Image (cartoon, rainbow, N blue to C red):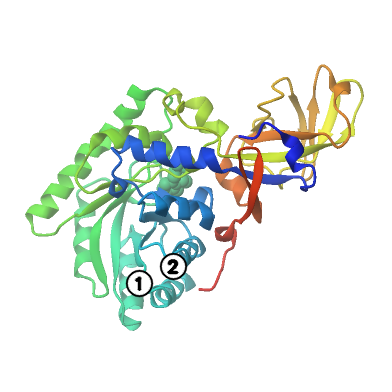
């Protein structure tokens, strides 16, 4: 992290901070959890959206990435990543944007999720018209009820449909079990096992009938803890948050103790509101408001702060000895949920060994880059 906030005396607040050594440590720890085999990892870039972080991953041999948007996928292709999976249904203009992306970045292989026969038809027609083809992965809903086809036998018909649609190649399965956030390891494992056996059975049936299910891309951070130990052929684990880590997951899962905070926020005291109150410039335009008020960030060096109120540009705090703070004092905050917080900032100051070593652009936060 950063222990000397003085080094940021000339840097504006609120600002996003990336801690380079901790990010490298987290990436290496993820790799370690999959037996140092980068082929078993496909980390989601939604958390950092930042080319410099992608370059660290590439330098560790991690050549597979996951994205949620065309812009994130383009940011990855601009970094020269060879293999990008877009875990998002393509509809409307995104279909042609995807075709444009494939043509523009010939050095990158793109694949995409499909969870409905109509989606396969639309995607196949777009690819065929553009003279292209794309690998499509059947997206399963393991219980999150966001996207995905139910885990039932009819999914095999969808997989066959993908395989027989011109312009598409059936590449395997994808699933994101974001609902499975159960705190205790055994409960999380039981929830996973509730449907996992059926997914594997369908894979076996499809393969017996001559349709390979080469890969299964699965999970986020809470189930990475489980999937990383399963060692299923062709399985790629796709945590995102762990690149930067945050208080939300760190506080909830004891298994994540080896991970370190790779991101923080610089904020300053802007007003003193009596003997026990201060206001800092960390409104919910700088730290994500998707968490309940009072549970959006922590202050690792000032744990006595109590939440009073939050608005667009202000965070009001209570402290038993508020007079010790002066106007302009710098404070370090750590977000509870880093992914939407990153998206609120155009760049992050990169910090290593208490030195600012760069200004890293959050390129993938834009809705459009080129395509
Ligand atoms: C499809 C998909 N895969 C992977 C992830 C990464 O999950 P986590 O943030 O728990 O690491 C997410 C997060 O929202 C996601 O939506």
Answer whether residue 168 is visible to the viewer in this image.
yes
Q: Is residue 63 left or right of residue 292?
A: left
Q: Position of residue 159 (x, y in %)?
A: 22, 59
Q: Quadrant of residue 354?
A: top right
Q: For mark 2, what is the residue?
A: 91
Q: Which mark is residue 53?
A: none
Q: Please tell me which of labels 1 and 2 falls first in the chain.
A: 2
Q: Residue at x 33, y 76 (%)?
A: 127
Secondary structure type for disc 1: helix
Q: Position of residue 66 (x, y in %)?
A: 40, 54
Q: Quadrant of residue 165?
A: bottom left
Q: For mark 1, what is the residue?
A: 122
Residue 241 or residue 348, whichever sits in front:
348
Outermost residue on the top side: it is 320
Compared to residue 334, the image places residue 207 above or below, namely below
Compared to residue 322, the image places residue 17 above or below, namely below
């Amino acid at each position: 992290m950063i222990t000397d906030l003085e080094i940021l005396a000339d840097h504006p607040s609120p600002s996003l901070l990336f801690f380079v050594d901790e990010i490298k440590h987290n990436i290496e720890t993820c790799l370690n959890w999959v037996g140092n085999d980068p082929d078993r990892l496909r980390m989601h870039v939604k958390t950092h959206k930042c080319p410099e972080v992608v370059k660290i991953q590439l330098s560790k041999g991690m050549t597979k990435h996951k994205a949620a948007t065309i812009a994130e996928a383009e940011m990855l292709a601009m970094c020269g990543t060879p293999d990008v999976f877009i875990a998002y249904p393509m509809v409307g203009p995104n279909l042609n944007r995807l075709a444009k992306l494939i043509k523009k970045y010939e050095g990158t292989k793109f694949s995409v999720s499909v969870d409905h026969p109509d989606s396969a038809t639309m995607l196949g027609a777009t690819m065929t018209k553009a003279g292209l083809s794309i690998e499509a992965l059947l997206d399963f809903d393991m219980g999150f009820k966001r996207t995905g086809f139910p885990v039932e036998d009819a999914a095999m018909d969808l997989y066959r449909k993908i395989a027989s649609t011109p312009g598409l190649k059936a590449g395997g399965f994808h699933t994101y079990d974001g609902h499975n956030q159960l705190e205790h390891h055994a409960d999380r494992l039981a929830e996973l096992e509730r449907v996992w056996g059926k997914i594997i059975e369908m894979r076996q049936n499809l393969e017996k009938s001559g349709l390979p299910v080469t890969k299964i891309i699965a999970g986020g951070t809470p189930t990475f803890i489980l999937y990383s130990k399963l060692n299923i052929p062709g399985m790629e684990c796709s945590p995102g948050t762990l690149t930067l880590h945050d208080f939300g997951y760190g506080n909830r899962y004891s298994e994540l103790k080896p991970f370190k905070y790779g991101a923080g926020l610089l904020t300053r005291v802007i007003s003193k509101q009596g003997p026990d109150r201060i206001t800092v410039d960390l409104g919910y335009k700088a730290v994500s408001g998707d968490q309940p008020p009072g549970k959006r960030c922590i202050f690792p060096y000032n744990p006595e702060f109590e939440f009073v109120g939050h608005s667009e540009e202000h965070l009001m705090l209570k402290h038993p000895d508020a007079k010790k703070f002066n106007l302009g004092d710098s404070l370090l905050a750590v977000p509870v949920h880093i992914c939407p917080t990153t998206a609120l900032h155009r760049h992050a100051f990169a910090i290593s060994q208490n030195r600012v070593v760069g200004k890293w652009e959050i390129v993938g936060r834009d809705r459009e880059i080129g395509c």
